[in-house]
Image: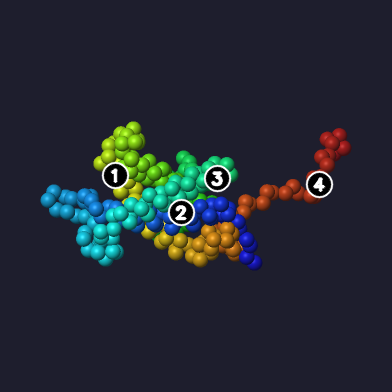
Amino acid sequence: MKRIVHKHPLAIRWFHWINFPVLFIMIWSGLLIYWAYDPYKIVLGDWTLISFFPDGFYKALGLSRRLAEGMAWHFVFMWLFLLNGLLYVGYTIVSGEWRHLVPNRHSFREAIQVTAYDLGLRKTQPPFVKYNGAQKIAYFSIMIMGAGSVLTGYAIYKPTQFYWLTALSGGYETARLIHFALTVGYVLFFVVHIAQVIRAGWTNFQSMITGFELQKPDDPGQPLRPAPEPQPDPTPAPAPIHPALS
């Protein structure tokens, strides 16, 4: 018989589903802005290995000549991104959810075990917890990246008013490069995250909508029950025979 396992509080689900479209719009509008000046590429000597991005990329997605539109969308939704992030961090601190998200000294070892299991290099599944080591590192990194995007975003948005922030970011050019690199990191996280969701199946995805998951009694993903403690023998031991009576 299946049993109900509560996984995600309502607040966590709201923050998750608000942040997903907001971050998508931020990336999309950021590309509209980046079109106006796109200097970043990976080169090896005189060879350009990767260019961010070729003209065909802009034309295929219809990003060309929409700088003003991109700036308008970006500057509006950055406030929603910031507010949602602050409320999320505040909730995790007040509710104690941060304990499930902040990596500990075992997280990196657990992440290696989980990765090896996902790649088929490890036969046994690591012990079930709410968030394994790989998830803790990934989710905590996303929070740090979000803070970095906000700070570097303000550093390049108002470099005169926030000159001290621009200086702490290494200057305007460095702040813009960090801001772009963080955006690439979000895209890579999306790809891996969606692949993991598909691999985990519908019940795992459903838990982020409803807050609970239905598990079978023999589901290997549920926590292992501890072995029962040995019970004392109810049969009384025979009384010792006194030497004088033997």
How many neighbours does mark 4 have within 10 angstroms: few (below 14), some (14-19), or many (20 or more)? few
Q: Residue at x 43, y 58 (%)?
A: 21
- CA distance for labels 4 and 1: 80 Å
Please tell me whether mark 2 sits on a helix, a strand or a loop: helix
Q: Is residue 3 left or right of residue 143?
A: right
Q: CA distance from mark 4 to mark 2?
A: 65 Å
| Mark whose residue sits in front, 4 or 2 | 2
- In the image, what residue type sits under mark 4? Pro
| Secondary structure of the residue carrying numbered label 1 | helix
Which residue matches tag 2? Answer: 19
Residue bearing mark 3:
91
Residue type (three-letter) at the residue carrying disc 3:
Tyr
Mark 4 = which residue?
A: 236
Marks 1/3: CA distance? 30 Å
Q: Nearer the viewer, mark 3 or mark 4?
A: 3
The residue to which callout 1 is attached is 176
Residue type of the residue flagged with mark 1: Arg
Residue type, mark 2 in image: Asn
Label 3 crowd (10 A; few <14 / some 14-19 / many >=20): some
